[in-house]
Image: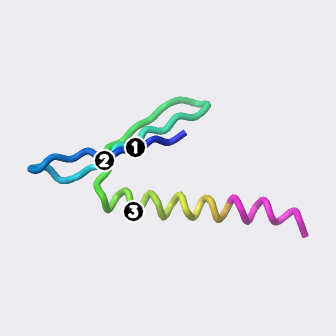
């Protein structure tokens, strides 16, 4: 599970808090908006890779 929420105040740069839970434990980070964009691209690539691996046995 992944939970995210925006942290910000008028005088502060907005941050996104990311909390992740899996079988091996929990983790969290506060990321800047450019870091969030990079994380999204990495996750998108992992999803495409997982989808491709799943379809490889169908041939």
Identify the residue at image location x=71%, y=62%: 51
Query: Of the numbered discs in the image, which one, if any, rests on residue 42?
Result: none
**Is-magenta flag for residue 56?**
yes
* In the foreground, 10 or 27: 10
Q: Quadrant of the N terminus?
A: top right
**Is-magenta flag for residue 24?**
no
Query: Of the numbered discs in the image, which one, if any, rests on residue 37?
Result: 3
User: What residue is disc 2 on?
Assistant: 6
Q: Earlier in the sequence, mark 3 or mark 2?
A: 2
User: What residue is disc 1 on?
Assistant: 18
Q: Nearer the viewer, mark 3 or mark 2?
A: 2
Q: Residue furthest left?
A: 11
Mark 3, secondary structure of its residue? helix
Q: Earlier in the sequence, mark 2 or mark 1?
A: 2
- Around disc 2, counting alpha carbons within 10 Å, would you say few (fewer than 14), some (14 to 19), or many (20 or more)? some
59, above or below 25, in the image = below
Identify the residue at image location x=60%, y=59%: 46
| Count of number-bearing discs | 3
Mark 3 and mark 2: span between their CA atoms?
14 Å
Residue 33, horizontal then vertical, whole percent: 30, 58
Where does the magenta region start and end?
A: 50-59
Mark 2, secondary structure of its residue? strand
38, above or below 6, in the image = below
Report the magenta stretch's main SS.
Answer: helix
- Around disc 1, counting alpha carbons within 10 Å, would you say few (fewer than 14), some (14 to 19), or many (20 or more)? some
Q: Is residue 9 left or right of residue 16?
A: left
Q: Is residue 11 left or right of residue 32?
A: left
Residue 47, horizontal then vertical, whole percent: 62, 59
Mark 1, secondary structure of its residue? strand
Q: Is residue 53 left or right of residue 47?
A: right
């Amino acid at each position: 599970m992944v939970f995210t929420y925006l942290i910000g105040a008028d005088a502060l740069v907005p941050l996104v808090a990311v909390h992740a839970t899996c079988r091996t434990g929990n983790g969290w980070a506060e990321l800047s908006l450019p870091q969030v964009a990079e994380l999204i691209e990495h996750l998108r690539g992992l999803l495409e890779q997982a989808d491709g691996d799943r379809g490889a046995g169908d041939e």
